[in-house]
Image: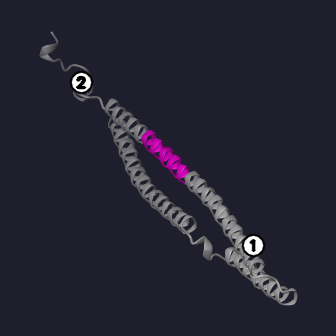
Amino acid sequence: MVFSTITAAASGAMGLFSGVKGLFDSAKAARKRKALMREGKAAEAAWYRRNYYGDFMNDTATRAAMKRVENTLHRNNRQNRAYARINGATPELALARGQQSMQSVENVMGALASQQSAERKRIDAHHLQNMNAFRNAEIADLSQEEQSGANAAAGGFNLLNSALMAVNWGNESKKKDGGNNTDNNEQ
């Protein structure tokens, strides 16, 4: 009788200890997971700002394209001046060729702007996909925490119920007396 009470109490104490330790370990893991989630979101936001709002006219590819156009324009202008000296071209012809050169610059700038617009759309879509992944991970974590909390509560109630059922409430004195102890209210 005493042995069963001791084992029930020890079982209850071990269950309580493991439950409390599990709660603390779970809370520590949740804090670490939330910190990592915050870091991931901050890194994603920084990547988005850097790429979406970046100066597309100042990146390497754009500068190289502009330099190629500039060199081509200088070469064409030299050729046009030489042609005008040799052939005696009119000022109107020189203006028309200059306009053609400016049109090519406009075409290059338009193409670069179009390319940057497409790049921004791609960056926006990638950012939206990453943010949805973060949201889905948080929803899964919250669902798991909800389920874990419900399971812990159910386990705690089952443990308490088992400990209470293992104790012979009010029957200890009857077993000591050999069952001869009668209660006046039982009549």
At label 2, which amino acid type do we have? Answer: Lys
Read off the residue under disc 1: 100
Name the outermost residue toward the top.
187
Q: How is the image coloured?
A: one colour
- Tell me the CA gap for discs 2 and 1: 114 Å
Find out whether the residues at labels 2 and 1 contact each other: C-beta distance under 8 Å: no
Vertical placement of 103 versus 162: above or below? below
The answer to which quarter of the image holds residue 75 is bottom right
Is residue 8 shown in magenta? no
Residues shaded magenta: 131-148
Q: Secondary structure at mark 1?
A: helix
Return the residue nearer the eye: 56 or 89: 89
Q: Main secondary structure of the magenta part?
A: helix
Foreground pick, 63 / 169: 63
Q: Which residue is mark 2?
A: 174
Element marked by disc 2: helix
Rendering coords of residue 95 (x, y %): 72, 78
Give residue 37's position: percent from left, percent from top: 49, 58
Q: Position of residue 44 (x, y in %)?
A: 53, 62
Q: Residue at x 41, y 49 (%)?
A: 18
Left or right of 116 on screen, residue 161: left
Judge whether residue 138 is colored magenta. Answer: yes
Q: Quadrant of residue 81?
A: bottom right
Amino acid type at image mark 1? Gln
Answer left or right for 26 relative to 6.
right
Residue closest to the eye, 129 or 38: 129
Count neighbours of disc 2 (C-alpha within 10 A) and say few if under 14, some if 14 to 19, many if 20 or more. few
